[in-house]
């Protein structure tokens, strides 16, 4: 299953999002849609001539998620999931990657959404068809002043590369030493450095902190 802390892919951009039928289908399959958006894939629902979930891939193709026929408005009436990769401009792209309908290769999973999302995640990861999620890292100082007041500063970042964040950490270390701070403890090496500093009865912990994630 996708990471529940990962950022969501953006909502689809079109004029149907206030259509009652579109909204009903979106809400009916929201757990599947949200899991796909956390992969992260821009996900939509088709509510015209056919009912299905679609998910955009980075090469211009898309996933088409249906059942034995259309997706029923009531998920309780599902007869398994059928997932294909298609391309509107390239008919040669037409492959089934998951089929838990009655005669499908994954029929034993039926309506279970966990193996569905696992299979889609594995497929788009192996083919590199999903946008990348990048961890953001900041250099922070947390401590207490000589007046016993809390000290919290964002000194650099967020950086989109951990190596860049470590480089900035080194720059901050040199700047603090030049300002008269004394390092009383250092640990973590170059993998995840952390150090404790003292200046005129002020104490601070310098460290690399997670600053969330972005989709690129």
Image: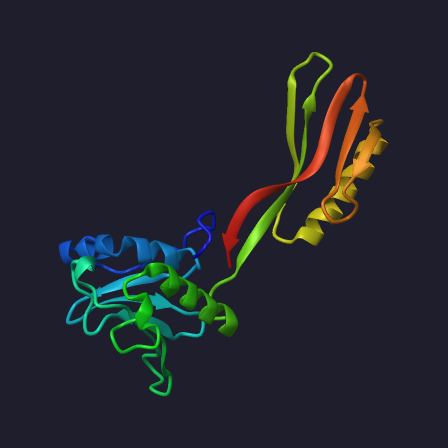
- For the view shown, which residue lies furthest in the front direction? 108
Q: Nearer the viewer, residue 165 or 187?
A: 187
Outermost residue toward the top?
147
The residue at 77%/48% (across/down) is 190
Residue 42, relative to residue 89: is it above or below?
above
Splitting the image into 4 quarters, where does residue 101 fall? bottom left
| Number of on-image labels | 0
Compared with 1, 201 (above or below) is above
Q: Residue at x 26, y 60 (%)?
A: 14
Q: Quadrant of residue 173?
A: top right
Residue 13 rendering spot, x and y as whole percentages: 31, 59
114 relative to 133 in the view: left or right? left
Q: Does residue 192 appear in this view?
A: yes
- 85 or 213: nearer the viewer: 85
Please state if 57 lies on the left or on the right of 79 as rendered. right
- How far from the left and from the top, in percent, is residue 123? 45, 71
Q: Residue at x 84, y 32 (%)?
A: 177
* Left or right: residue 43 compared with residue 204: left
Q: How is the image coloured?
A: rainbow
Q: Is residue 11 visible?
A: no
In the depicted view, which residue is nearer to us: 96 or 24? 96
Question: Residue 35: where, in percent of width, then height?
Answer: 38, 56
């Amino acid at each position: 299953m996708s990471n529940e802390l990962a950022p969501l892919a953006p909502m689809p951009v079109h004029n149907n999002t206030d259509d009652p039928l579109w909204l009903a289908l979106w809400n009916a399959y929201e757990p599947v849609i949200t899991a796909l958006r956390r992969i992260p894939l821009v996900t939509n629902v088709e509510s015209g001539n056919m009912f299905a979930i679609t998910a955009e891939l980075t090469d211009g193709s898309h996933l088409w998620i249906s059942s034995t026929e259309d997706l029923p408005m009531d998920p309780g009436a599902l007869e398994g999931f059928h997932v294909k990769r298609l391309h509107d401009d390239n008919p040669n792209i037409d492959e089934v990657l998951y089929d838990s309908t009655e005669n499908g290769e994954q029929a034993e999973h039926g309506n279970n959404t966990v193996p569905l999302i696992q299979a889609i995640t594995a497929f788009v990861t192996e083919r590199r068809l999903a946008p990348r999620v990048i961890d953001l890292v900041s250099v922070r100082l947390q401590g207490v002043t000589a007046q016993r007041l809390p000290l919290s500063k964002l000194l650099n970042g967020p950086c989109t590369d951990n190596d860049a964040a470590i480089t900035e950490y080194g720059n901050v270390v040199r700047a603090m030493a030049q300002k008269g701070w004394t390092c009383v403890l250092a640990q973590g090496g170059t993998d995840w450095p952390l150090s404790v500093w003292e200046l005129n009865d002020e104490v601070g912990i310098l460290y690399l902190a997670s600053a969330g994630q972005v989709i690129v």
